[in-house]
Image: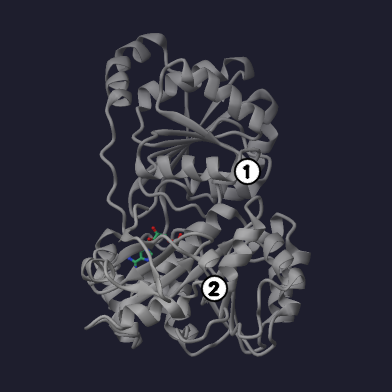
Amino acid sequence: MNHTSFETFGISSEILKALTSLRYFNPTAVQESVIPLALKRQDILVESQTGSGKTVAFGIPLCEQAEWEENKPQALILVPTRELALQVKNDIMNIGRLKRIKVTAVFGKSSFKTQKSELKQKSHIVVGTPGRILEHLKEGTLVVDKISSLVLDEADEMLNMGFIEQVEDIIDYLPKERQTMLFSATMSSEINRLASFYMSPDRASVKMESSIENTPKILHSYINVEEAAKEKILLDLLTIENPDACIIFCNTKDVVDGVVRHLDKADLPIDKLHGGMDQDDRLDVMNEFRSGKLRYLVATDVAARGIDIDNVTHVVNYDVPFEKESYTHRTGRTGRAGKTGLALTMVSENDRTRWQEIREYAFDDNHEITEVFAPNDRVVTRAKAAFEKKIKTRIAPKIARNKELNKYITKVYFNGGKKKKLRAVDFVGTLTSIRDISAEDIGIITIQENVTYVEIMNGKGPYVISEMQHRKVKGKALKVSKARK
Ligand code: AMP
């Protein structure tokens, strides 16, 4: 257990207060190494696993360094997937919330126009996937002349996914005078090449050695199965294991569909996630799984990377992954935050060679991997009652980490926006004319076509709403209420 406190980094009180509200009391090992270097604006190459607290490690320095008054983006974070973009956005917004830091996420398969309009408004930090970031750069809708920090998150995965050219094109748009931080779970010659091309020669290197504390506690096991018996054995194993929350990984979306169809017959609280789905559907499913509404998620590798969900007790590889690295990423979804998780891989006759390669790649001699066997029907029948009881029990909703933080902040709705030619300055003008309300009490302002949302800080939301009932914004009387979402 680490006893250093975040105060030793000399960061501002708004960020310290947010960290406490988020229940981050002591820095993790990677945070302890990275934060002081990042605050000195050094370039840093970090080898560290997801789950080590790396988002907070770069999030704190970025929020600390961001200047609120500057309207143009000051930091750019590149991530491999859309889900991760949203997750990083939320994590950093939470850290910077009391400093009123606005983070905008941009990614593909989502409205370019909406993103363009968001980027036009104040955005201190932009996080996105390489393809869409590059489109915005080409269109001139992402302004980068004030970018002073670049973060490449999950760099190994961005390279695996073939984003290298886009990443390099993006870097060419950025000011040369900047800080660059690269985070990767694994180092390779390609990553070192990127680092030597685009980072300072005196960059710092941080390698988080695995220690008992930061190694995920995962019990690895496998089962040899006949391809044709996989569906039945899966359900039998789930019945016996009776997991609280489980991700079942398949190699293709067709297999995902087949497994869901089969498990649906058992009436499980289940849904699926794969790249062929609509972005909104993907986010809804992730949120339902994260909140505990779904106990089972059947997914392709889109769910394997970076996604941070506490309390996944079981990961099942219904298929042996095609890529060796995927095994580590998939199983890394469990055993997080000091809890023990169970990983089980189903190995059919066609997968034996690939499984052997993965074992050689992922495990050294000290790692135990246990062979398990298909349960017999008697054992399964005996386990059934407990299994059925659990799948019918609603999971208590998890308390969002930022609940405490949100207590200080009220999102206020106004029924007028761009169409009425309203701008942020009009809202700030009216709101600061209220007694005891200053610019410091006004958080993120989001102006849409017909509506505007303004965050009111420091618990002053209800007071502002009541005062605004008889005030106008730029001469216009608007309906004002607490925002519903
Ligand atoms: P990451 O490596 O960014 O995926 O983070 C892993 C998890 O650790 C996330 O759930 C964070 O909310 C959590 N976390 C990050 N920093 C801390 C901290 N200092 N104390 C407790 N939890 C943390």
Q: Residue at x 29, y 46 (%)?
A: 398
**Would the CB of label 1 be found within 8 Å of ligand 1?**
no
Q: Is residue 165 above or below residue 69?
A: above
Q: As rendered, which of 182 and 112 lies closer to the eye? A: 112
**Separation (CA) of disc 2 from disc 1:** 47 Å
Please state the horizontal and vertical placement of residue 211, each as a whole percent of the image. Answer: 41, 63
Query: What amino acid is at disc 1?
Result: Ile
SS for tag 2?
loop
Q: Which residue is mark 1?
A: 358
Residue 140, image quadrant: bottom right
Q: Is residue 182 above or below residue 306?
A: below
Which quadrant contains ligand 1? bottom left
Q: Is residue 397 above or below residue 316?
A: below
Q: As rendered, which of 124 and 298 lies closer to the eye? A: 124
Q: Which residue is mark 2?
A: 121
Locate residue 176 relative to residue 183 in the image: left or right: right
Q: Residue at x 68, y 61 (%)?
A: 132
